[in-house]
């Protein structure tokens, strides 16, 4: 164990379903893109309200429709949500939402635009209910919760050589410590694992799981080749080799390093909630707003995001800890990065000390310290589609 | 930080290579005291111990390749001696 001192408990929100939140957000969900503007207008009256609005649409084909429905349901009942107002377009969909939320164990309300009499009245009705939900939400207090109730979403973006050597390995050490304490972590972006099949296989406790994980990686590689992109064979590129990368495994491990060294516990589909603690691979596209949406929908309460050059991506429902090992990026984006580990490069900080600092930041963030992405209100929700909508 | 020793990082305790973190390619010593061959650029690897021909080259705690010939302690490890 190279990161010590993760406390047994942190101060969090115990939800009625047994899950634990690190925030008590007031959320306005726009259940279909038709009412995104209504949601914005309603939410603007309560400073702390957060809008969950994606490109939620009608006419999706069956697997895509199901994925969108599950993701929006999971997001609005996420453990970081203290109260929610769901806005719908029509009365029929409002009825379905009321039924779904009946047992969600937190203050909630559902409104349909078609039940309102004009925009002004609609905005007024929404704001009135939202302000009431806000009052109820504020009565919920933090209590000691086990640190092992946390699940991290693992992400990297703007990757450069420092990501592979500093930010991602430091995240990996914290993941090892958190899983050791009974917690969980989800990594995604399947295509990034192409080339790292052997190390992944070595971390699978069963041949069955290895076959599932390697199958997902092979399928992602196949889809890439369908678009005319050959990855294996041209990687590492001449530029990579000049930068010091010798083999494809070494290149891929730069990203895989953020998963630490513990065994994989399973493979998840987009937005699927893990059944047990431990480390999971979620099969998602590589675009970070999309992959983070999937991991947060699965219940991850905090995102650990390794940076080389800057990437603004975050998520409105899970605080994002931006971790950077590049001294130039850390200096230029000081107001948008949470943990600056660039001293590792100058040898003023060891990787273990860097991970220790990151572990402390994790605990402080879980207990309520605002992250930069929260301060800037960064965040997108993107649910992938596989078929052209009707 | 010493001016005569090179900054480097060993990612995992099981690794037999370390990655150089500075541009001091004329220097002959790593921070921590190990001797290192001159000329190894930022981001490139040096052997932490002798690696026999055919032996795994380990970084991130995993085999990233195999030595295609014997590699001495402190030598540059790259495509010329590892695949």
Image (cartoon, coloured by chain):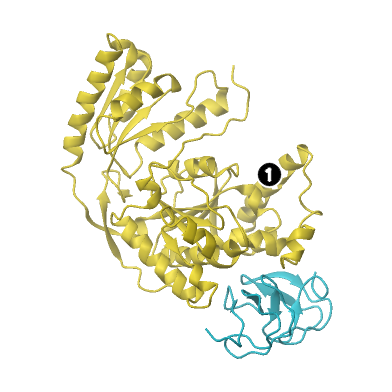
The C terminus of chain B, quarter of image: bottom right
Quarter of the image holding residue B81? bottom right
Is A371 or A177 nearer to us in this picture? A371
Give coordinates of residue A271: x percent, y percent. 49, 40
In this picture, is A349 found above or below A128?
below
Q: The cyan chain is which one?
A: B
Q: How many discs appear?
A: 1
Q: Nearer the viewer, residue A145 or A58?
A: A58
User: Which x, y percent locates residue A262?
Assistant: 53, 65
Q: Residues within 10 Å of mark 1 (few under 14, many from 20)?
A: many
Chain designation of label 1: A
Quadrant in which residue A269 is drawn: top right
Residue A363, how many percent across, how many down?
34, 62
- Is residue A204 visible to the viewer in this orientation of the structure? no
Q: Which of B72 and A145 is in front in this view?
A: B72
Seen from the viewer's position, the closer of residues A44 and A295 is A44
Which percent across, then down, holds residue A216? 65, 46
Residue bearing mark 1:
A220
Tell me what residue is drawn at x 73 percent, y 75 percent: B56
Please give left or right for residue A183 compared with residue A125 in the image: right
Rendered position, A14 above or below A87 = below
Vertical arrangement, residue A33 with respect to residue A201, above or below: above
Chain letter tied to yellow: A
Q: Is residue A337 left or right of residue A288?
A: left
């Amino acid at each position: 164990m190279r990161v010590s001192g993760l406390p047994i408990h942190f101060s969090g929100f115990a939800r009625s379903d047994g899950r634990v939140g690190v925030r008590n957000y007031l959320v306005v969900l726009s259940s279909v893109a038709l009412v995104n503007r209504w949601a914005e207008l309603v939410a603007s009256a309560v400073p702390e309200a957060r809008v969950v609005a994606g490109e939620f649409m009608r006419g999706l084909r069956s697997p895509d429709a199901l994925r969108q429905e599950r993701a929006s349901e999971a997001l609005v009942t996420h453990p970081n949500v203290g109260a929610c107002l769901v806005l719908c377009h029509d009365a029929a969909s409002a009825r379905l939402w009321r039924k779904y939320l009946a047992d969600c164990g937190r203050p909630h309300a559902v409104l349909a635009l078609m039940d309102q009499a004009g925009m002004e009245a609609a905005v007024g009705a929404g704001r009135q209910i939202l302000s009431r939900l806000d009052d109820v939400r504020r009565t919920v207090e933090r209590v000691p919760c086990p640190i092992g109730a946390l699940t991290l979403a693992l992400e990297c973006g703007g990757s450069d050589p420092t990501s592979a050597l500093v930010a991602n390995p430091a995240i990996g050490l914290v993941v090892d410590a958190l899983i050791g304490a009974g917690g969980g972590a989800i990594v995604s972006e399947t295509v990034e694992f192409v080339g790292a099949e052997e190390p992944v296989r070595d971390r699978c406790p069963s041949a069955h799981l290895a076959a599932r994980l390697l199958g997902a990686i092979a399928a992602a590689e196949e889809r890439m080749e369908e678009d005319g992109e050959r990855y294996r064979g041209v990687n590492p590129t001449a530029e990579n080799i000049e930068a010091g990368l010798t083999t494809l495994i070494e290149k891929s491990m730069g990203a895989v390093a953020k998963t630490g060294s513990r065994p994989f516990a399973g493979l998840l589909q987009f937005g699927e909630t893990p059944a047990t603690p431990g480390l999971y691979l979620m099969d998602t596209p590589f675009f970070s707003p999309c992959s983070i949406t999937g991991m947060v929908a699965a219940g991850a309460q905090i995102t650990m995001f390794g940076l080389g050059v800057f990437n603004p991506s975050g998520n409105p429902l899970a605080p994002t800890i931006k971790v950077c090992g590049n001294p130039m990026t850390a200096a230029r984006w000081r107001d948008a990065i949470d943990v600056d580990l660039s001293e590792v490069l100058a040898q003023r900080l060891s990787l273990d000390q860097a991970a220790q600092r990151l572990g402390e930041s994790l605990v402080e963030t879980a207990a309520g310290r605002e992250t930069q992405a929260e301060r800037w209100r960064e965040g997108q929700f993107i649910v992938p589609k596989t078929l052209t909508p009707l | 930080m010493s001016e005569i020793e090179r900054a480097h990082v060993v990612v995992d305790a099981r690794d037999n290579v370390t990655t150089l973190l500075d541009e001091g390619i004329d220097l002959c010593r790593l921070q921590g005291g190990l001797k290192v061959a001159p000329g190894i650029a930022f981001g490139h690897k040096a052997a932490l111990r002798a690696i026999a021909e055919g032996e795994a080259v380990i970084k991130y705690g995993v085999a990233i390749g195999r030595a295609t010939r014997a590699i001495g302690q402190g030598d540059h490890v790259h495509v010329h001696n590892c695949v």
